[in-house]
Amino acid sequence: MSIGQSQRVEGEGARQTRAGSAATSALWAAWADAVGWISELTDEKGLDRRLRGRELGAVPWRRRVGGRGGVDVDLPAGAWSDDTQLRLAVGRCLSARGFDVEAFSRVELPVWRAYAFGGGFATKAAASVMAKPGARWSVNTSSGYWDAGGNGAAMRIQPHAWRHRQDSGDATLLLDVLRDAVTTHGHPRAILGAALHALCVIDLMPDGNRSLLKGVASWTSLLDRVSLVSDLAADDSELSALWLPQWSHAEYSSWGKAAGATLIEMQSEAERVAAVVEKAPNFEAGYVAVVDLLDLRDAKQRGSGSRTSLAALALLALARRHDRASASVLIAAASVVETDTDTIATMAGALLGLLETDGPPGPVLDEQYLVAEARRIADADGPGEAPVRYPDLLNWDPPRTQADALLEQLGENERLLVAGLGSAVPLGQPIVAARGDFAWQWVRLEFGQTVLIKRRPKLARANLASRSAPAPAVGAQQQGGDEPSDQEPTLVEAQDSATARHDRQLDHPGQDASVTVTTAQRADAAAQKPAQGVPARRGEPADVAQALADAHTRVRSSSYDTRQIGLMLVRLATDLGPEVASVFGAMVAGDIARMRRPHSS
């Protein structure tokens, strides 16, 4: 199958089944993303150049990827951007066990950098931070994190709403949304905007209240429910111990005050948008008035998480008020250049798609995969098994740079490996940059997603037993490291050995006498002096994060010796409080649970 070719998969009873409804929502959101991406970050003349005399729609087009040192690429009809890429990444982290925020932050985000089609500053910065050793999803150290109020979180949270049920209450849904959002964004405009959109999606699911179908009168109660987010962080052990204490902003003294002020701001904006919607003589005039009211052409406002969510909600209300077909609504939204066309359109598409029984009118890249994933997540019996078996995070080493995520698989003819995500089939030859230092390669991942991934002209090799990437050679430059030496074990091989040792100890304690003795000696020595990195008094949030990372490292290096675990728990509880100790306990428990799961192959 060539790039962009897909088989039409219609929604099956979207009004009657959760799975069918989620499938059409996913398709319409991806199609709208594809249409809006063409008109993103350009003016009327630029859009004309991209379209080459054609009408705006899901058409093939050409654009540069990789910046000045990149390449010009022909994109197939229906190719979507970072909005859908990150939505799929979130979806893969959902299973019967819930939302795996560790996999999303430590695997999906760092690897996404290699194949990202666009992406906001906050999300890219967070992805880079999460690629660093010892990174935690709840401790984002990127510059500008607390001011990050963009729509990068809101655009990807639909899978959470597809998974949850309305009758399970808002708290469970919104806690997942909060944990997802804070991995990349720290400002309440981003987080509350994501919460608002999630509540809109779950409202329109077949088993939802569908109050939005009554018009703008339902918006007040919807925004009242958003207020719950401001209290949820205090109820989560990791957010309360690590994220809340370090929350910082020049205008507000605490997260609660910032969230409260932002909610009042959103309620005021919603009231004004609702008035515009009700007075609009037609759809076009109404949407232009909403754009002007929310300043969505202004560079400082067009990517706002809260305002983008309101814009998508306004498009839904205008469409129903003026009896407009979903396709024409989304094309109209994508036609208003100098707004965030792809994100507004994709979020509106996710809502409108919940009211459709069929897919959109044009092609959508990887349609079968999109449909299968949405149906899996929204299944009436709960999400099925995710399509990816993530690497053991104890040993996972994220790609150091964007170009290090694509690897060569030993013993596999014509098959590659995308670090953390699995096997991939190349689609055509690499597109080499003019300088010859990097290339871009179309590949299709084993679970069905097509990506254009940055790579090195000569790929590093990966062990088939692991999905993790080898570390660059010692002394190699950040952008041009050599492959690991054939004479020495690769990081992958070393990790396989370490993992086997951990499993052996957990399943057969005492078999490896040399390890047991060494561990005991280390524990005795540790008892004689303070744990490195653990402050002797309650410290700042950065100290807390470092203390957790150091304690985690010591326990891992001891092969999870119980005395070492107990020592670290006591030290953390004594020096930093029981909340921090409980976070550490959850980290260790998660490690052990992952080691007991079968490893990916």
Image (spheres, rainbow, N blue to C red):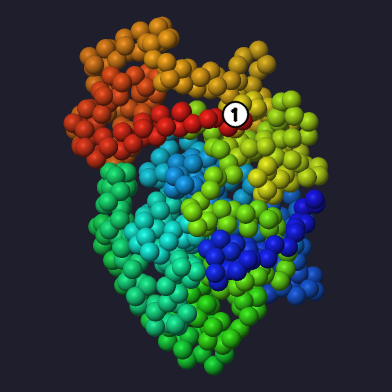
Q: Nearer the viewer, residue 420 or 60?
A: 420
| Residue 518 higher or lower than 104, as above or below | above
Q: Where is residue 105 shown, x and y percent of the image?
A: 47, 44
Q: How many marks?
A: 1
Q: Pointer 1: what residue? A: 466
Vertical side of 534 occupied by 256: above or below: below
Q: Is residue 396 above or below residue 173?
A: above
Residue 425 seen in the current view: yes
Q: Where is residue 589, by image quadrant?
A: top left
User: Hey, what amino acid is under mark 1?
Assistant: Ser
Helix, strand or loop status at disc 1: loop
Q: Is residue 291 left or right of residue 259?
A: right
- Residue occupying the point 45% across, 83% down: 215
Q: Is residue 450 left or right of residue 52?
A: left
Tell me what residue is drawn at x 22 percent, y 27 percent: 570
The x, y position of residue 528, in whole percent, is 22, 14
Whole-percent x, y for residue 217 in the image? 39, 83
Instruction: Judge left or right: residue 80 versus residue 496.
Output: right
Residue found 31% across the figure and 63% down from its top: 228
Asked where in the image residue 307 lies, by quadrant, the reply is bottom left
Crowd rating for badge 1 (residues with CA inside 10 Å; few <14, some 14–19, many 20+): many
Residue 142 seen anywhere in this rendered image of the structure: no
Residue ID at (59%, 20%): 493
**In the displayed structure image, the side of residue 271 where residue 284 appears, left or right:** right
- Of the 4 image quadrants, the one containing the C terminus is top right
Q: Is residue 294 above or below residue 257?
A: below
Task: In this rendered view, identify the residue nearer to me: 33 or 358.
Answer: 358
Give the percent coordinates (x, y) of residue 192.
38, 63
